[in-house]
Amino acid sequence: MPAISIDSAQRRVCLNTRDPAFYRDPLAAYAEIHAHCPSFYWVERQQWYFAGYEQVNVLLRDRRFGRQILHVATREELGMPAPKPHLADFDALEAYSLLELEPPAHTRLRTLVNRAFVSRQIEQLKPDIEQLSHALIDGFEMDDGVELLQAYAETIPVTIIARMLGIPVEAASDLLDWSHRMVRMYVFNPSYETELDANEASAEFAAYLRGIIAEKRRAPADDLLTHMITSEKDGERLSEAELVSTTALLLNAGHEATVHQIGNAVKTILQSGLSAKDLFATEATTELTVEECLRFAAPLHIFQRYALSDVELEEGISLRKGDKIGLLLGAANVDPKKFSDPNTFRPTRDEGANVSFGAGLHFCIGAPLARLELKLSLPILFQRLPNMRLKAEPEVKDAFHFHGLERLDLAW
């Protein structure tokens, strides 16, 4: 059990995210929080957090909160520090990220991208995902074991999103490297060295993408990047900076969370003692299993938002314009008021949707793609390797925002 201190009367929680007992298994801490104060002031983080399912679901849709704040206030008004010069390239790549924008900029960008991610478009990728899954397993099934994240879980989503965008699949190793270095910025209190490395990765990534965009302008193709370059909304096209930011986001978000979810799902299923053959027996059982993996072993545990004005929330929680709140997606998914016996992996449950993809304006645009990749790659893996087992207890990453494994060594 992680070292957690809760003052229920004041709704104050002390909890160190670097405590291995916490980041390896945050569900125990979430159970304590649900029992005492699902809305709480996290002392180490110096802000309010929300863990209840209904709270999180409502706040994700609450337009009094947004992903950015500088469109309605200045840094001086809010007392925010100036941008760090050594993060200029990282900040430039984030500047037009769909994840960070609010309307009308968000609406314009999302409209241009959304067409490629609707379910009917995504379903057309099914043969590609199946073929790729089998081809990867062909490469290691005759061995007596494998490190699954690198050999399988990473390769599927990065290959598929690269193909969708029209980016050479041969660049996958570079794309993964840049992405891994950039997402380290999303942990609490990244080090100066992490910031420098993320900035360098951002500069390299942006330079690469500018070259690809220039090539698409010269030789348009039938892919998402060409669509974004040539599409218009209200007579406007995406600027170079918007194209680079949006493409980087789609590449990073298009695989980073899915890698962790595949790893978390395989670990969860193997440790559950349940029959994989039964879990993936039909399309219906497969869908239930995937949704339970998303609920029980979600890869993304926090989504942060700014109060766009002074806001009064439940029971006297007063927020000033510019205050940040944290929405604990991973905790909402194990709220006992929503899910019975929530800390048990039970794929037969039918108790409503998880919030692993968020909700509202910033609901994950890639959710249909991620779900399809999971519904295909997991059954194929367990069908091809029915005697698969954990070679050792997997090590969990020391990164609370992203709940995932360092590696997943399997044997059969």
Image (spheres, grey):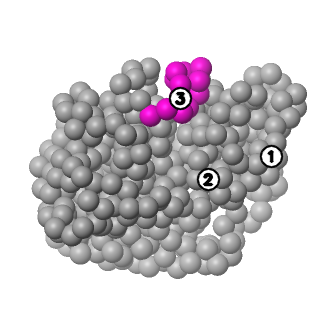
> Disc 1, disc 2: CB below 8 Å?
no
The amino acid marked with disc number 1 is Cys
The amino acid marked with disc number 3 is Pro
Which percent across, then down, holds residue 235?
A: 33, 48
Query: Where is residue 316, by image quadrant?
Result: top right
| Prevailing SS of the magenta stretch | loop
Which percent across, then down, holds residue 64?
A: 65, 32
Task: Say if the magenta span includes residue 176.
Answer: no
Q: Nearer the viewer, residue 178 or 271?
A: 271
Which portion, as a residue range, is magenta?
334-345
Residue identifier under label 2: 23
Q: Residue at x 34, y 36 (%)?
A: 274
Residue identifier under label 1: 14
**SS assignment at label 3:** loop
Which percent across, then down, holds residue 61?
A: 55, 29
Task: Say if the magenta span includes residue 339.
Answer: yes
Residue identifier under label 3: 342
Q: Is 404 placed above or below 280 here?
A: below
The alpha-carbon separation of the residues under discs 3 and 1 comes to 23 Å
Q: Nearer the viewer, residue 99 or 371?
A: 371
> Disc 3, disc 2: CB below 8 Å?
no
The amino acid marked with disc number 2 is Tyr
**SS assignment at label 2:** helix
Q: Residue at x 29, y 75 (%)?
A: 171
Give the quarter of the figure containing the N terminus: top right
The alpha-carbon separation of the residues under discs 1 and 2 comes to 14 Å
Q: Foreground mark, 3 or 1?
A: 3
